[in-house]
Amino acid sequence: MVTPAEPVLKTKMEDMGSLKAPRSVPQSKGKKAHLLEIIVQSAAREMPNVDPNKVIEAVGMKVQKEGARLIQMGNTVLMITPKGPGVIELHTSSIDSPEEIVKQWRTFLTKTAKSMGIKKVLSYSNSPAITRLVQKVGLPIKISQTPQGFRYEMDI
């Protein structure tokens, strides 16, 4: 009698999954996603009509040409771009809960920015929901309205 070269399984094989990264990271598991995946998912949610790859290209250009830096805190990515001595512009991409985003901003503004020698933080948004989150940070952040949306400014 000849035996098969490979064993014959009588039970169903476990699905090993695909080689691609998951499309979304469940927030409840507390796993930290890769910063590019965070940016892609955040862009897809915030700007559904924009190709997420174009967002990644724009971030790459900011890093190369303007000296922007990416800081990952949990599943939140903060892009800081120098605008002058001690002054930065801050942009956020996140797949964290709104409460976690507020916590990350507070940590950045009270600890990280100070340790980096940052004196002033500027940011912009056209979303009233973002303005409500900024107000929940509980720090003296100046909020003003411009024709393009909202402007946020904080002295560190």
Image (cartoon, grey):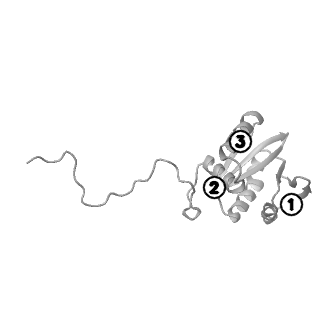
Query: In the image, is residue 144 above or below residue 40?
Result: below
Q: Which residue is mark 1?
A: 140
Q: Position of residue 113 (x, y in %)?
A: 77, 49
Q: Amino acid at mark 1?
A: Pro
Secondary structure at badge 3 equals helix
Q: Disc 2 or disc 1, which is closer to the eye?
A: 2
Secondary structure at badge 1 equals loop
Q: Which residue does the image show at 73% across and 52% down from the upper left?
A: 92
Q: Which residue does the image show at 71% across and 48% down from the upper left?
A: 50
Q: Quadrant of residue 152?
A: bottom right
Label 1, label 3: how far apart the Cα atoms are: 28 Å
Front-lying residue, 142 or 8: 8
The reply, left or right, for residue 144 in relation to residue 38 is: right
The reply, left or right, for residue 108 in relation to residue 15 is: right
Q: Amino acid at mark 3?
A: Val
- Indicate which disc residue 59 carries: 3
Query: In the image, is residue 41 above or below residue 63?
Result: below
Label 2, label 1: how far apart the Cα atoms are: 25 Å
Report the residue that reaches farthest toward the top.
65
- Indicate which disc residue 75 carries: 2
Label 2, label 3: how far apart the Cα atoms are: 17 Å
Secondary structure at badge 2 equals loop
Q: Position of residue 72 (x, y in %)?
A: 66, 50
Q: Position of residue 137 (x, y in %)?
A: 78, 63
Q: Do the CB atoms of the residues marked 2 and 3 lie less than 8 Å apart?
A: no
Report the residue that reaches farthest toward the left.
1
Front-lying residue, 52 or 137: 52
Q: Do the CB atoms of the residues marked 2 and 1 lie less than 8 Å apart?
A: no
Q: Disc 2 or disc 3, which is closer to the eye?
A: 3
